[in-house]
Amino acid sequence: MTGDDFNTLVTACDGDKVLTVNADPSHCWEGESWETRFRAVGSRIVAAHVKNFSIRPGIALRKMAPKWQDRAMQFVDLPSGDLNMVRYVEMLMDVGYPQRYCAIMKTASAPLVVEAESAYRDLDACSANGIAYARDHLCFPAAQGSFEDGMGA
């Protein structure tokens, strides 16, 4: 499903507020980038996974080989995949995910759910790596203004 497909569903359901999105950029395989998809549905993002992948060229993208190492799309640890995870978090901030989550859940912060998966790494090690990566690289103080604000523009 693409962002446009989801918005068509929302329209068909008369804008029902129950239709929401769990952002997970590792599943954008339909020819649209993760940013195109999630900006299209940004006002409905209420949860966010952080998960990374790498695509091996020359192998059919949807090849369902029983051995994961033989598949084209490989889930990998957060720092080594094709996605720029910091840009992903910045996009989530830009479309209002943190504020929306906090308003719905009545919390002071919004989670980034690390979903660790790997065809090669032990899952506990992959999870520990993902949690540390999110802590060290994806959780940062949000800017309160722009450079131009500070310059008096």
Image (tube, rainbow, N blue to C red):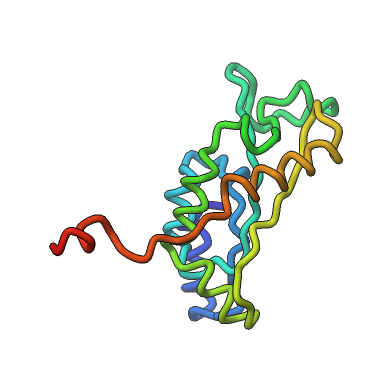
Name which quarter of the figure residue 21 lies in. Answer: bottom right
Q: Residue at x 83, y 36 (%)?
A: 125
Q: How many marks?
A: 0
Q: Observer-nearest residue: 93 or 72?
A: 93
Q: Position of residue 131 (x, y in %)?
A: 72, 47
Q: In this rendering, is residue 20 above or below 29?
A: below
Q: Quadrant of the C terminus?
A: bottom left
Q: Is residue 35 left or right of residue 20?
A: left
Q: In this rendering, is residue 102 above or below 2?
A: below
Q: Position of residue 134 (x, y in %)?
A: 64, 48
Q: Is residue 47 left or right of residue 144?
A: right
Q: Is residue 44 left or right of residue 110?
A: left
Q: In this rendering, is residue 68 above or below 134?
A: above
Q: In this rendering, is residue 10 above or below 49?
A: below
Q: Residue at x 65, y 79 (%)?
A: 105
Q: Position of residue 133 (x, y in %)?
A: 65, 43
Q: Residue at x 51, y 39 (%)?
A: 84
Q: Position of residue 73 (x, y in %)?
A: 66, 30
Name which quarter of the figure residue 142 lies in. Answer: bottom left
Q: Residue furthest top?
A: 58
